[in-house]
Amino acid sequence: MKKEKRIVRVGVVGGGAIAQRRHLPEYAANPNAEIAGIFDFNTDRMEELCEQYGAKPYASLEEMVSDPSIDAISVCTPNYTHAEATITALRAGKHALCEKPMALSLEETRRMLAAEKESGKILMLGHNQRLIKAHLKAHELIQDGAIGKLLFYQCNFKHAGPESWSIDRGSSTWFFRKDKANFGVMGDLGAHKIDLIRFLTDDEIKDVFATMMTLDKRYEDGSLIELEDNAVCQFHMHSGMPGIMHFSWTNYGDEDNSTIIYGDKGVMKIFGDYADDIVLEMRDGSHIKYSVGAISTNTNQLKSGVIDEFVAAILEGRKPIVTGIDGHNTLAVIEKAMQSAREGKWLDIEY
């Protein structure tokens, strides 16, 4: 007898840009997933998306998670709602995929982790950079000793800002509102690279010294936004390796999503040149190039891999490649970086 194919039925909470550009189309393209329903406070938008994807509109998150036919929930809402929406889903016995940053505070992330443990369900974070093929290959090369002992790293994530990508365009975007986002560029772009360096090095960040500023992003009245649009962070890993990262919403040239790792045998450049995914510049003068796959930009959206990994983890009954602990530890670094910028001193990360 042929085994019946199992389908993961998903409810998507929030119908903004990340849902429209990543979650919904990627669930629709996954043969093992079905978009069962959508909930969004913007009812017109919700109805349009439901019609587009053949999904059921829900009047509330509570109504959605009480539906026994739904297996999992994607939380695609603004930052300040992440914790409660995720906890609600987990306590209702649903697997949960939460967008980054995981929450507003470690107190919230700890409650999310407790709900995951109590439910026995999967909690995955939408840190997509460790799922990019070039980054998976880079991790493999580092583990194989391709550039030797790691000495230093430098990461950039810089583009022109979320106001051209968000559903609410311009200065009205929720990304600029402290009550909804809590973090500026640190939560938006910093979360990605902090998680990535943890993945690439298989190490945690020990301490941080950060400088944050608001250079150019403004509200409609011309005043600077109350969140940072640039951040520069210095780190030490637990291994002792130092590194530096620059995150920016004021890069009005080509998007920069590069990572450079220096070893005692050579240098690894990942997306330093978009023509080559990974370039190893070796100590003997030789260059080794790996063309593995491109990286998404705001103007060239590619499949993230997050949805496929989430669905596969559910069906295979295993932990996803990005866990709740990854989200918690990344937020711990962001919190201390914010505090460091306020106090002007090095601070140890408290996990």
Image (spheres, grey):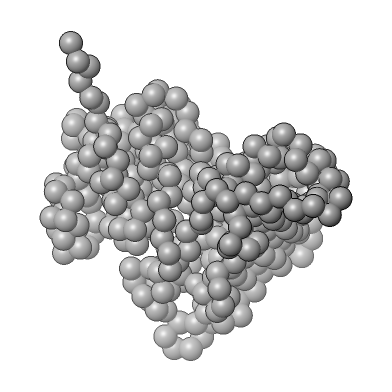
The quarter of the picture where the C terminus appears is top right
Residue 11, picture quadrant = top left
x and y percent of residue 237 in the render? 76, 45
> Residue at left 58%, top 63%?
274
x and y percent of residue 15 in the render? 28, 57
Up-down relation of residue 319 to residue 208 (above or below): above
Asked if residue 205 shows in the view, the reply is yes
x and y percent of residue 243 in the render? 76, 54
Up-down relation of residue 124 to residue 100 (above or below): above
> Residue at left 56%, top 78%?
253
* 267 to the left or right of 75: right
Residue 42, picture quadrant = bottom left
> Residue at left 35%, top 35%?
311
The quarter of the picture where the N terminus appears is top left
Q: Nearer the viewer, residue 1 or 285?
A: 285
* 82 to the left or right of 242: left
Q: Nearer the viewer, residue 66 or 264?
A: 264
Asked if residue 193 shows in the view, the reply is no
